[in-house]
Amino acid sequence: MRLRPSELLFFFVLGAAASLVGDHSHVVTGTTRYFTEAVPFVWSSPLWFPVLVGAATAILAELRLHLGTPRASVTVRQGVAGVAAVLGSYVLTALLHSAPIVPTTTLIVALATVTWCVLGDGPGAVCGVLAAVIGPFVEIGIAAAGVFAYHDDCDQLFGVGRGWCRCISRSEWSRRCSESWRSSAGRR
């Protein structure tokens, strides 16, 4: 393990907190609806949702450090900007849930690409692809279990709709954060 427990906790909390904002945006716009009340909810999300996203964020941050040395030139300020870009993209998918798929997908992919071009690297792209592929498969499984569904207007991928757009927007999240965290930690 390359991340200290406190760093893993930081990434877990960061991912969990961001997931609550993004998921709340999806619930209040009608993009997502949950069918279960068997577990406690935090804001608009069942408890397991921020736990899953927080764990995925921490795992991707750790994985990124195993794929090569992070760039030392990424600052905390750039990391914060990256988190804001990802969160903005996540919320944007909620606002555009009934928009046509091609322009919406193009917009989200363009935003993710610009973010990656400014802050990313090859290993970050690997983490991004993993998040963009694994995330929707997890969502497909959960949707198939009848736990939640997306609005019919955006339900175009095995019950997941534009879930992969959200994963694309999140994919740079852990890598950027791990680089900025390590960069700032090295300067202490």
Image (cartoon, rainbow, N blue to C red):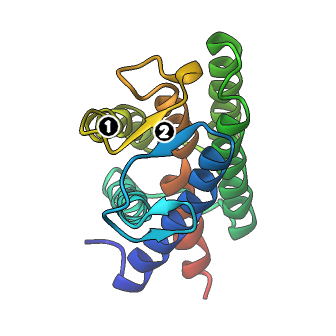
SS of the residue at dot 1?
A: helix
In this rendering, would 28 be left or right of 61? Answer: right
Q: Label 2 is placed on what type of residue?
A: Cys
For label 1, the residue is: 134
Callout 2: helix, strand or loop?
A: helix
User: Which of the 4 image quadrants contains residue 96?
Assistant: top right
Q: Give the residue at x 64% y 11%.
A: 102
Residue 163 location, x and y as percent?
A: 48, 33
Vertical position of residue 87 compared to residue 1: above or below: above
Label 2: how many Cα within 10 Å (few below 14, some 14–19, many 20+): many
**Residue located 33% across and 60% down the image:** 59
Residue visible at 61% across and 44% down in the picture: 26
Residue linked to disc 2: 167
Mark 2 or mark 1: whose residue is earlier in sequence: 1
Direction from residue 12 to residue 24 in the image, left or right = right
Query: Counting other residues with Cα less than 10 Å from the Cα at mark 1, is it few (<14), some (14-19), or many (20 or more)?
Result: some
Give the percent coordinates (x, y) of residue 30.
Answer: 63, 39
Can residue 128 be seen from the camera position used here?
yes
Residue found 57% across the figure and 67% down from its top: 43
Q: Quadrant of the N terminus?
A: bottom left
The spot of residue 94 in percent (x, y) is: 66, 38
Q: Which mark is residue 55?
A: none
Are the residues at dot 2 and dot 1 in contact (C-beta closer than 8 Å)?
Answer: yes
Rendered view: 148 above or below 157: below
- Position of residue 105 measured from the top left corner of the image (x, y, whole percent): 62, 20
94 and 185: which one is in front? 94
Q: CA separation, marks 2 and 1? A: 9 Å
Q: Amino acid at mark 1?
A: Ile
